[in-house]
Image: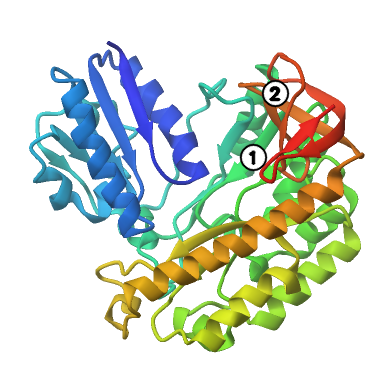
Amino acid sequence: MAVDVVTFGCRLNIYESELIRREAEGAGLSDTVIVNSCAVTGEAVRQARQSIRRLRRERTGARIVVTGCAAQTEANTFAAMPEVDRVVGNDEKFDAARLIGAERVAVGDVMASRAIARPVIERQAGHTRGFVQVQNGCDHRCTFCIIPYGRGNSRSLGADDVLRQVRRFVEHGAREVVLTGVDITSYGADLDGAPTLGALVKRILREVPELPRLRLSSIDSVEADRDLIDALAGEERLMPHLHLSLQAGDDMILKRMKRRHTRADAVSFCDAVRRLRPDVAFGADIIAGFPTETEAMFARSLDLVDDCGLTQLHVFPFSPRPGTPAARMPQLDRDVVKDRARRLRDKGEAALAAQLARQVGARRSVLVERGNVGHTAQFLPVKLARPTAPGIILDLTIAGHDGRRLLAA
């Protein structure tokens, strides 16, 4: 058996898993499973632990290495698992020597990190789009979030290195590139001249004209710069889909979360972008059941779906992360948290179904992926009517939907 990488969490982890795989295979590792973990919620950590136990049952002779954000923030938790052979931190996971070393725990001080990994890869296994990490870490300290302690402070990849990776993906057949990171709208603040994400986007579109589609991962709307808004308004190759880190719809809860925007800021941003790019679709992260959240406060999060025109929700039932301020706040009953998360998901599913219904009869550009599915520019999933080779872009008529995805004619 060669090297298997099991990935949890965000798009950044997807990108980094490919780098880990390349380093491990280049170092001659075999019969090894590397678990790239996520720490965003307690459930994500639980799932990683559950997967590790299952992997040990299925791969009795394999070496199991755990890395990623949960390994960084909870190294002792994973080191205590008899199924685990080695725990490697986020800064060490691209170093083949650390992956194969003898010490059981190799987890350094990620807060001291000032650089970002620069390897260039040709393609990402199992994906028709290329993910490019332009930024890592976060300088903000939202009261619920453990990720800065797993990723360190914000640091950016120089534009020349970003362009090099984008070109490499395009040369090897990628039709879409996704810019990803932990807080990508903070891009460039640590670089000479403090270039912005918008400036980077414009440069990519200008200098790689053969790239058909450029997409952004989750952004913080309050950090969106003028160049980014201009690019959304005027660059058709920049996909009209924004996933926003909103987290709540009530101003008091936003304040207790230590977010930097208000409810009015979120609504105003969505309205402004929609005027400039009418075909834009918005997704958002929203937390249900944050400490001290009343039913009236929660209702404002529900209402935010309509007020911002959100159609693709990522709902997180609040999960207290040890070491964060929110974990020390008065907690809600878990049944209340779960119920609010369910109601938010129901709201999101209804909003998505309405968005899908509006597409019926329209012609849409679809990037075909494996499994006879694809995505529109607005990142709406599409089931194709007939087998089609992945990696091509088709102009298709939408014949219907099943409540979760569009159905092509």
**Image location (x, y in percent) of residue 23:** 36, 23
Q: Earlier in the sequence, mark 1 or mark 2?
A: 2
Rendered view: 279 above or below 409: below
Nearer to me, 284 or 301: 301
Tell me the kind of residue under disc 1: Val
What x and y, as percent, mark residue 85? Answer: 13, 32
Determine if residue 210 is in view: yes
Q: Secondary structure at mark 1?
A: strand
Q: Which mark is residue 14?
A: none
Which of these two is toward me, 204 or 257? 257
Circle 1: is it few (<14), some (14-19), or many (20+) Cα within 10 Å? many
Quarter placement of the N terminus: top left
The residue under label 2 is which amino acid type? Val
Seen in the picture, residue 189 relative to 143 is either above or below; the reply is above
Q: Residue 372 occupies which quadrant of the picture? A: top right
Q: Position of residue 368 (x, y in %)?
A: 72, 24
Q: Residue at x 12, y 44 (%)?
A: 79
Name the side, left or right, on which 102 lies relative to 277: left
The quarter of the image holding the C terminus is top right
Q: Is residue 149 left or right of residue 276?
A: left
Residue 274 left/right relative to 245: right
Q: In this picture, is 39 found above or below 55?
A: below
Crowd tier of the residue under label 2, counting other residues whose Cα lies within 10 Å: few below 14, some 14–19, many 20 or above: many
Q: Which residue is mark 2?
A: 170
Q: Nearer the viewer, mark 1 or mark 2?
A: 1
> Residue 255: percent from the left, percent from the top?
51, 85
The Cα–Cα distance between marks 1 and 2, rounded to whole angstroms, is: 12 Å
Colour scheme: rainbow
Residue at image mark 1: 178
Which of the 4 image quadrants contains residue 218? bottom right
Residue at horizontal 50%, vertical 64%? 342
